[in-house]
Amino acid sequence: MSRFEGQMRAQRGLKALSIQATKAADAADDDLLFSIISKDELLVTIDLRPYRDGDATLGLCGSPGLIIEMLPYIKKNVIIKKRSRKAIGLWIGKVVKEFFFFLSKIEIETARKIRSFSEMCEYDGILLKRYLMERGGDQSSRKKIYTKIYSMIREVRPNSAKKLIWPSYIVSQSARVHTDIDPRAIREVYHTCKRIIEAHDVSQDRIMGWVTGAVPETDVRCRLGRSVWEHLYNKILQPELIDRAKRSAENQKFQKLKDEIGLRDYSELTYCFAPSAIEVTASILIVSMETGWIDAIHGIDLEADWYANRSTQSSVLTRSTDTVVIYATRPKTGGEVVGIGMAGSRYRSFQLIKRLEEKSQFLRLCLKIKLDDLALLPESEKIKAEILEIKHKLRSPWIYYAHQLGVGSNCVGISSAPKLDQVMARILEKTVDNLAPRKRQDQKLVSSIRSLTWSDMRDAFAEHIYQSSGGNIYVLRNALNHKNIQVSKAYINQRKQIKARFDAFRCVVESALGELKNHRPIDPTILFLTANGGIISQEDRDRLKRFRSRMGMGCSDPRQPDAHLAQGHKKGAICTVQRCILCSKGVIFSESFRYIAKRYGDLLWLRENISPQRWLTSSFWWEINAVELVRDKIFRHRSSEFDKVAKERLYHVKAGEEFVFDDPGCGGVVHWDEQ
């Protein structure tokens, strides 16, 4: 133990734990009151006694028989299924609570009391459906509650009871339209977040410069102590000095220090060793903009391997240009998600998380010492809950200093959804205040900024990825970490994207009519390019006839490939990358069949010979999805032949007769005519 830690422990000592003599001790043996450790390793206490005894304030009628019958089913869903704390609260609140409110309504209105699940009949299903429909809100969510209650009743009812057949709960499957996000609003909020982080860094740099400077014996700094870091830590984080009354006296001692360094107020001293709530929220906003994460942001675990070099799959980052993969776990489902960013960029996800981890080292030390103290105390539910909460804070990068939360380790706050909403509102107002006078007069921009929510960050991210990838839904699905592509499609149902698709359809119809008017056959390739690129000139038609890439595909503009595929492309030169299946300018012809099938064989070999994580975070994953889409949609009548050609290619590559990274043989394919 360092002298620093020892001094703190000596000053604080171990405080006796006061245990209140309450009815909780008698309730320890009550099966309806129990505690479990959730999937996110937090202690959750579940109290089902109101459903047995009733609660007049909530208008809840108790039913001892029903809740006892339900108890094994409830424990199975919250213990065996290992849900997160949030998921447990939602399940209890939406399924159990809604069910008992429904029973209470029946008892109050009809004087019929259901004491057992065997007493329930088909008519109860009609009443439950009507009750949920009258409750209002999102009917899709109500349907899920209805289905879960029905499943619970069927499982809990005794086998001898008559089988229940309840009515279906049908909800119209109208497409969800996501919010149209103004990119200017996102850009302005991003710059505000950067300024907030920069302001905190400037304060820290001032204090660091003051600390590391030469200290003459008569200087005020000597009277504060040689180790200013130690002094600030002891004076600000110690429980006895966190108290506001005592801290006001300490303010007088720091007045000269504040004037000398040039700080605005006393709280700015904390910026040198602990992040503030607004600084953490600004960092979370930028990370959300870059990764599209909302709930997964809270699933980053600093005590696990939360990042890796994308090239080497190790935690060693040797260059600022290295690409880093960030891992997180979705709190609700427990599924792993990944985000990709640059290692050396100061305002990218990786550097922001590392910065907060380093800056919160003193808060983490305070938490660890408190954890050691708790380990020496007698075990109880309260102590267990506090230990799990502290461990939860230690795993999270989003902790901050907040003296108003209490004393000791309690002054370490952690960002949660309600707190983020409050602080985000302050950041949005700062954004509006920082607008240039000309922009401030733009009421549409001001309204867009003030109406932003956390989910809008994901919508904006999805729109950016979809547009940047040339409308590739598979790229979007991979970026959003979706398993079902139908979920990803909902994100492109923004109104301006729907309008763009209608405009594209209008262009196709006008193009087809124009082709007929000029006595030309209707070419699907021309219609596609018209819908996506505008007017097609005679030169474009000639180029499509002359040019074939190494993939046997045509190209509408081989001198200007998509920037995300050919990042080092020389302006005016022919595309050397030629990964045409991913390019928005690529055009598939019937003679492209064999070359695309061979490329599919290459991709199958790559999938077998590189690590799964490298595969899933590379563009090869997108490419193989695109090739399979072409096979199933365009060449569906020749799919068996397609797979045969791909297997032949894979066989030759494995035998060393052909090589994946060599250009595929292009015999018979016409190349660009330079004349």
Image (cartoon, rainbow, N blue to C red):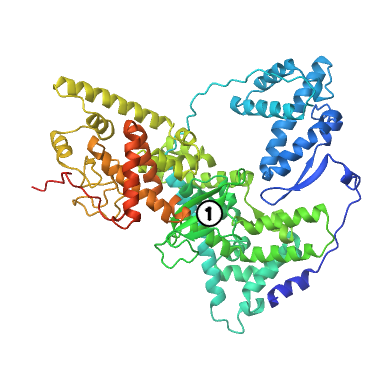
Say whether residue 633 is left or right of residue 433. Answer: left
Q: Position of residue 75 (x, y in %)?
A: 76, 40
Q: Residue at x 70, y 57 (%)?
A: 390
Instruction: Quickly name the residue at label 1.
Output: 327
Q: In the rendered view, tell whether residue 173 sits above or below residue 196.
A: above
Q: Amino acid at mark 1?
A: Tyr
Q: Pick out the residue farthest to the bottom.
A: 217
Q: In the rendered view, tell whether residue 589 sits above or below residue 43.
A: above
Name the image quarter holding residue 366.
bottom right
Say whether residue 517 is left or right of residue 263. Answer: left
Q: Quadrant of the N terminus?
A: bottom right
Q: Nearer the viewer, residue 243 or 664?
A: 664
Q: Would you say residue 282 is visible in this rendering?
A: yes
Name the image quarter holding residue 558.
top left
Circle 1 packing at 10 Å, graded few (<14), some (14-19), many (20+), is many
Q: Position of residue 71 (x, y in %)?
A: 80, 36
Say whether residue 561 is left or right of residue 90. Answer: left
Q: Position of residue 336 (x, y in %)?
A: 55, 49
Q: Position of residue 441 (x, y in %)?
A: 41, 38
